[in-house]
Each structure stands twice: as C-alpha cells, then as structure tokens.
Image (tube, grey):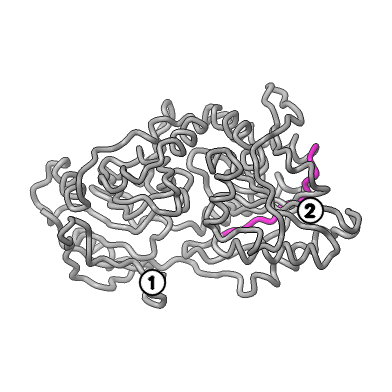
C-alpha cells in the first residue's frame, strides 16, 4: 500500500547577511535617535510570538545600541491574543524563544491592556498597548512574510505588528473579525492612525530566505512605513519556500505549530485557506493532508489543525484547547480548528489517507513527506515524481530508494530531514 520514496533536495536562493549585528547597527543609525529624543529616554522594542531566526541576536543588538546612544531600552510584548492574552502567557512565549530579561539585559513589559487612539472613517478603532505610553519611542521589529489569510501588498510585517501585535486581544479580535476582502484596506487605515498618533520611531523589517537565513534587515522611518513595506514583502514572497510540485494525492507533514506558521501549517504552502465564503487557491492542489505531531514550541496551540484531513491521537492529546480556541475565536476562522479524522498511530493515519483516495496501485500515488511547511529543503517524494524531478535543475535526488518504515508504536523511524551539512538541526 505504501509507495517507494526518494529523498529530494530543493535548491533555493540562499543569499543572506553575513554580519547581523553590524547590519542592525548601521540600519538603526538611519533613525538619528539623538536628534529626536533626549538622553535617558525610554525606547520600547517589540517582540512577538513568531519564530524568527536570529531574533535574540537582533533584539540584543538593538538593546546594546540604544544603551550606547544613552537611552533606556525595554522589550514590549507584542503578540495580539497569543500567550492567552495574558502577561504570564506572553512571558512564557518569549521565554521559549530565548527572550528574557536576563538574555536581553533589559526589562520586559508584558500585558494586554489597550487604549483607543482613534477611529477610521468606517468606524474601526485603532488600539494600542498601554505599555507603549511608558516609553518615549517605539522601534517595531518583525519578520515580513505572506499572511495566512490577508492579501495585498501589506501582510505580516511591521504595520500588522502595530495593528494586531501591539493592538492586543482587542486589536486582534477586531481585525480578524473583518471579512478577508476588508483586511487590506483596514490594515492600512488602522496602521496610519497608529503611526500618526503613537510614539513609533520606525520599524526594522526582517526578510528570511527559504533556509530561514536572514536575508534582509532594513530600517524604515514611520513616515515611510506603509509606503516602503510592500517592497520588502515582494522580496519575502520571492524567497519563501514552496512545494516542488502543484498536484498531490497525499502530503504528510511531520509537525505543525505556531512556530512554523500562524495557522500551524502555512496556507500559502499547502494551498488551503478554509475561510468560509472565500475561494480556495488554485494551486497547489492536495487531495489529502496528514499532520502527525504538534511542535512543543507551539505550547499546545493547534490553530490550523482543521487544514488537515487526517491526524494522530498523539497530536490531539497535546492540544491546549483554551489557547487554541482563543486563537481561532479571535481570528473568526472557525473551520481551521475542526479536528480531522484521528487515528492511533502515524502509520495508520497515513494508510487511512491513502485508502480514502480509492487508489489500489501505490506506484501511481503522488505522495510527499515534509518536516513542516517551513522546512522544505528536503522532501520525500514517491517514485511517481521521478521523471519530473530529473528534468528540474533546482531538484537533486539524494537517495532514490527509501522504504517507509515504522517502529513498534507505529511512528516513522527512518526518515531524517536534517541538512547534510548540519546534522544538529
């Protein structure tokens, strides 16, 4: 029933920044802080729940730079409703990312209380975290990447960090309650109000490539933020990892979680939005998605589990339903949290997904196995794809004879997604 597999390596563009602290320091100099703020001013630096490679080094460099310039830096927890919308939950999320008062050598201001600073022409409120007003200035830091529901030129990034991240549960709930078609205009309108009425100095935008290497770090002043962020978004879109093919019978995903995507599995990678009333992407087209486990770094938040068709009891037992339901109710995209067909083991989940297709010949099955929707350099493909792979210069067959095997507990035991040059990953 199970097909023969190949281990295939995808070759993505891999340019990046060699000296991150030096780049951060040069970009921060563009803000000319000494000309704008008095010595001793408190400057907040945003930190969120999203996994960003090198984020500890980037934040610590900003902290050190501000101290050298004579300012008092602090970290502002900016993650919307994540961390259950509570200070202790936010601190736990930051701690899991290596962001603590000790590692930063700066205080962390957590909490979700917000104030309304204005309204859009359509009556939407612009909320901001009260901790912002304990500072004389804020530097917004975030990775820029495609969003899992938002469309347009401004998606996940600096403006959204203001609107949703610093907007707390109030800002997040209002924003996600809007129809998908309303989001592009709303993020601009609310973002404009916040940038005009809050002490935001500017943003430090981060773009990563498909290998999660930091490819771009750019400082943008408040007056140019909405105008210039789209250019960074286009770079992020070009560099993001993707599946090697568009048509699949079964895709097996090793782990999902908030550390990989806001929806656990990136909707832009799997081609599923599951937003009522909105059309699904034309590609990729995947008939069955199986997700096997929930990452520990997701802290039990399984938002996006409903994007899959099959899963395991192991994953379901790890779900923190309070955290997951808060996330999905805030986003309003309820179907994304429907529990898929659940089976006792990884082996059974994969086999049942294949059975559900009514295919009797495993030799014709278009199947793939990936570690997560963020890590796509190495992909296990069924031999059905062999001729297509050989015609592609960006694909390399690493092992053409892989048999899927399971241990006594029904878990896959012989597949490794570690990069060949770094077995520690």
Residue 68 screen position, x and y as percent: 81, 68
- Vertical arrangement, residue 111 with respect to residue 29, above or below: above
**Residue located farthest toward the top when viewing the structure as drawn:** 123
Residue 410 lies in what quarter of the image? bottom left
The quarter of the image holding the C terminus is bottom left
Quickly name the residue at label 2.
43
Left or right for 91, reference 32? left
- Vertical arrangement, residue 205 with respect to residue 323, above or below: below
Does 201 lie within the magenta span? yes
**Residue located farthest toward the bottom when viewing the structure as drawn:** 421
**In terms of sequence position, does the residue under pointer 1 or pointer 2 come before the other?**
2
Looking at the image, is mark 1 or mark 2 nearer the viewer? Answer: 2
Residue name at image x 80 percent, y 61 percent: 30
Looking at the rendered structure, which numbered label has been put on residue 419? 1
Question: In terms of secondary structure, where does tag 1 sit?
Answer: loop
Question: In terms of secondary structure, where does tag 2 sit?
Answer: strand
- Quick one: label 1, few (<14), some, or many (20+) residues within 10 Å? few
Residue 242 screen position, x and y as percent: 41, 55
Residue name at image x 58 percent, y 43 percent: 155
Q: Main secondary structure of the magenta part?
A: strand
- The span shown in magenta is 197-207
> Would you say the residues marked 1 and 2 are in contact, meaning their CB atoms lie under 8 Å apart?
no
- Quick one: label 2, few (<14), some, or many (20+) residues within 10 Å? many
Residue 382 screen position, x and y as percent: 21, 59
| Residue 153 visible, this orientation | no
Given residues 145 and 294, the one toward you in this image is 294
Residue name at image x 43 percent, y 30 percent: 278
């Amino acid at each position: 029933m199970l097909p023969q597999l190949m281990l295939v390596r995808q070759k993505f563009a891999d340019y990046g920044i060699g000296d991150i602290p030096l780049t951060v320091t040069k970009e921060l100099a563009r803000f000319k802080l000494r000309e704008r703020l008095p010595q001793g001013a408190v400057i907040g630096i945003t930190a969120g729940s999203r996994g960003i490679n090198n984020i500890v080094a980037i934040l610590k460099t900003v902290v050190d730079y501000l101290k050298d310039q004579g300012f008092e830096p602090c970290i502002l927890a900016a993650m919307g409703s994540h961390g259950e919308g509570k200070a202790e939950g936010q601190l736990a999320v930051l701690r899991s990312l290596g962001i603590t008062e000790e590692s930063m050598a700066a205080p962390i201001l957590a909490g979700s209380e917000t104030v309304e600073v204005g309204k859009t022409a359509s009556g939407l409120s612009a909320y901001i975290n009260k901790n912002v007003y304990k500072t004389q200035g804020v530097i917004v830091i975030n990775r820029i990447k495609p969003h899992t529901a938002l469309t347009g030129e401004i998606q996940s990034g600096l403006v959204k960090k203001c609107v949703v991240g610093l907007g707390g549960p109030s800002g997040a709930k209002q924003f996600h309650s809007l129809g998908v078609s309303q989001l592009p205009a709303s993020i601009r309108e609310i973002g404009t109000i916040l940038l005009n009425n809050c002490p935001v100095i500017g943003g430090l935008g981060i773009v990563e490539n498909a290998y999660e290497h930091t490819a771009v770090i750019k400082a943008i002043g408040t007056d140019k933020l909405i105008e210039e962020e789209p250019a960074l978004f286009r770079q992020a879109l070009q560099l993001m990892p993707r599946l090697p093919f568009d048509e699949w019978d079964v895709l097996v995903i090793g782990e999902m979680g908030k550390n990989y995507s806001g929806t656990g599995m990136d909707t832009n990678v799997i081609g599923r939005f599951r937003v009522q009333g909105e059309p699904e992407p034309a590609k990729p087209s995947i008939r069955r998605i199986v997700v096997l486990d929930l990452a520990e770094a997701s802290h039990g938040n399984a938002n996006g589990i409903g994007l899959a068709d099959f899963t395991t009891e192991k994953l379901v037992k790890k779900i923190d339903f309070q955290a997951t339901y808060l996330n999905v109710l805030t986003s309003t995209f309820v179907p994304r949290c429907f529990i898929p067909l659940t089976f006792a083991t990884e082996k059974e989940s994969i086999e049942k997904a294949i059975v559900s297709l009514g295919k009797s010949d495993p030799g014709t099955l278009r199947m793939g196995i990936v570690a997560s929707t963020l890590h796509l350099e190495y992909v296990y493909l069924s031999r059905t794809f062999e001729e297509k792979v050989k015609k592609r210069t960006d694909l390399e067959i690493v092992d053409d004879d892989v048999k899927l095997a399971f241990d006594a507990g029904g878990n896959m035991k012989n597949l490794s997604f570690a990069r060949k040059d770094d077995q520690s990953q």
